[in-house]
Image (spheres, rainbow, N blue to C red):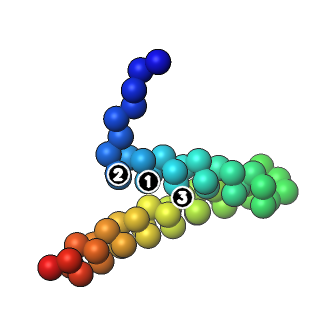
Amino acid sequence: MPKMNLTHFEAAVLFSLFTSVVLGVVTKQNDRDRLHYGVYVFICFVVALFGLGWLMYFGHG
């Protein structure tokens, strides 16, 4: 089986994608709401990823 070499950023985006799909499927009743909520949660994850990344960058000095 081939090895996957992911950077921390790629792994975090992949986690965000899978988590947003699961949350969209589990929490909403129809397909339209599932899609909108899944996209919304994915965007929130990516914004938080960049925000926390910059916060750690500036906090580290």
Q: Is residue 49 above or below residue 17?
A: below
Earlier in the chain: of badge 3 and badge 2, it is: 2
Q: Is residue 17 above or below residue 59?
A: above
The answer to whether residue 32 is visible is no
Q: Judge left or right: residue 60 versus residue 9.
A: left
Disc 2: which residue = 8
Seen from this angle, which residue lies furthest right? 29
Image coordinates for residue 47, horizontal then vertical, percent? 42, 67
Camera-side residue of 61 and 30: 61
Q: Residue at x 52, y 51 (%)?
A: 15
Label 3 – label 1 distance at C-alpha: 11 Å
SS category of the residue bearing label 1:
helix
Occupied quadrant, residue 4 = top left
Asked whether the beta carbons under mark 3 and mark 1 sit within 8 Å of each other, the answer is no
Q: Residue at x 31, y 68 (%)?
A: 53
Q: Which mark is residue 42?
A: 3
- Badge 1: how crowded within 10 Å, few (<14), some, or many (20+)? some
Occupied quadrant, residue 59 = bottom left
Camera-side residue of 39 and 46: 46
Image coordinates for residue 7, horizontal then vertical, percent? 32, 45
The amino acid marked with disc number 1 is Ala
Q: Judge left or right: residue 33 versus residue 19.
A: right
The amino acid marked with disc number 2 is His
Asked whether the beta carbons under mark 2 and mark 1 sit within 8 Å of each other, the answer is yes
